[in-house]
Every structure is written in C-alpha cells, then in structure tokens.
C-alpha cells in the first residue's frame, strides 16, 4: 500500500496475516498467498538463492515476473514485465521476507515491508503502516518486526552506498543475480 496524502488519505491499513508463498521445485509450481497454484517456467538454485520465472495470466498490468529469493539477506527481489504499451517507473520490487529453504520446496513469509528500487535514482519504503498494524494486532511478533526493520535499514544503506544499483550492492554480499531479457 502506497501512502496517500490529502483528503483521501487512508488512516487505517488493511490488516492481514503475513502472506505465505510456496515454491515447489519438483512440481515446477508457485503457490501464491491466496492459494492459487501457478506454473513456473524456470527455477534455478544458486549458492546465494533461488531464481523463479513465470508468466502472469490475466493480469492487466503484469505479463510475467522473475524473482530471486535471497535467504542470506531476507529479501525477495522481483522484476515485473509489463504488457506492450505499459511501463513502470521502477525496475525492482523488493519484499522483506523470511525464507525457509528445503530440498524440494522453498517457502517465504512476508514481513510486510517492501522497497521500490529505481536504478540510479532512489528507493521508496512501502507498508510500514501495515507492519505496525500487524504488530499491534498480534499477527507478527516484535522480534520478527525488528528483524524486518533491520533488514530494511541494511538494504537502504547498501543501496544508497552503491548509487541505488541493486546488482552492484548485491555483488558485495556474494550474490550475483542474473535477469532475463524476457
């Protein structure tokens, strides 16, 4: 949820439990937070994380996505592909997550905070209000919320130090994600 300003500003965020997503490498599926099972075009396991590429069917503003799950730093980094004629004003959407790694299935638990990275230009943090509402409602415990904030701060500092170039910052952490030219 992006913060709104002015007379239409929302004062209460939508409160929901942490979103859980499954990535089944053997079945080549991705189960989204609503329980929908989606076919995955490609999984690739690297020492630093898991690459996921899949089409997005029947969505007005997304035709495909590719993500990297990076358990060592608690991030899921996604690059969305837009349908012809549409274009985003950012390159990467970053979810702060807990990642459970299994031999067959990976699992993410979203910790509410998101970052929108505009390569070379800056970064925005989203959904702080959702994280705080979830803590108050008892949907996420204090230690998980503190870890989410610490991950967000580390990410902001790392991106700023590297001119808001995500791949440059990640390379200093031993992660070398590659992105398709879908």
Image: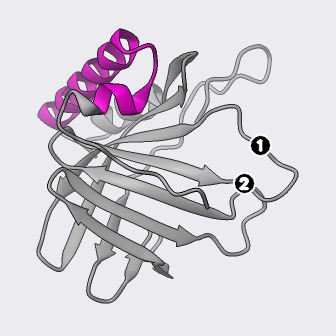
Horizontal and vertical percent position of residue 112: 38, 40
| Residue highlighted by disc 2 | 82
Tell me which numbered mark, 1 or 2, is placed earlier along the sequence: 2
Q: Is residue 6 left or right of residue 168?
A: right
Q: Is residue 56 magenta?
A: no
- What residue is at 34 percent from the left and 47 percent from the top? 177
Give the residue furthest to the right: 85
Horizontal and vertical percent position of residue 163: 44, 13
Characterize the local packing of mark 1: few (<14), some (14-19) or many (20 or more) Cα atoms within 10 angstroms.
Answer: few
- What residue is at 40 percent from the left and 65 percent from the top? 52
- Relative to 103, residue 9 above or below: above
- Classify residue 143 by image quadrant: top left
Characterize the local packing of mark 2: few (<14), some (14-19) or many (20 or more) Cα atoms within 10 angstroms.
Answer: some
- Residue 87's label in the rendered image is 1
Give the residue furthest to the top: 161
Q: What is the span of residues highlighted in magenta in the rendered image?
A: 142-170
- What residue is at 17 percent from the left and 80 percent from the top? 104
Counting labels gives 2
Query: What quarter of the picture does the N terminus occupy?
Result: top right
């Amino acid at each position: 949820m992006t913060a709104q300003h002015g007379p239409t500003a929302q004062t209460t965020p939508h409160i929901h439990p942490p979103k859980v997503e499954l990535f089944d490498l053997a079945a080549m599926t991705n189960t989204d937070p609503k329980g929908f099972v989606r076919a995955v075009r490609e999984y690739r396991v690297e020492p630093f994380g898991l690459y996921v590429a899949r089409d997005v069917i029947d969505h007005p503003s997304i035709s495909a996505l590719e993500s990297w799950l990076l358990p060592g730093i608690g991030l899921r980094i996604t690059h969305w592909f837009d349908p012809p004629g549409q274009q985003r004003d950012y390159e990467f959407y970053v979810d702060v997550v807990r990642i459970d790694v299994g031999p067959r299935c990976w699992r993410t638990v979203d910790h509410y905070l998101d970052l929108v990275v505009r390569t070379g230009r800056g970064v925005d943090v989203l959904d702080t209000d959702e994280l705080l509402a979830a803590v108050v409602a008892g949907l996420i415990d204090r230690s998980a919320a503190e870890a989410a904030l610490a991950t967000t701060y580390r990410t902001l500092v790392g991106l700023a130090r590297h001119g808001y170039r995500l791949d440059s910052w990640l390379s200093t952490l031993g992660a070398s994600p590659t992105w398709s030219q879908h």
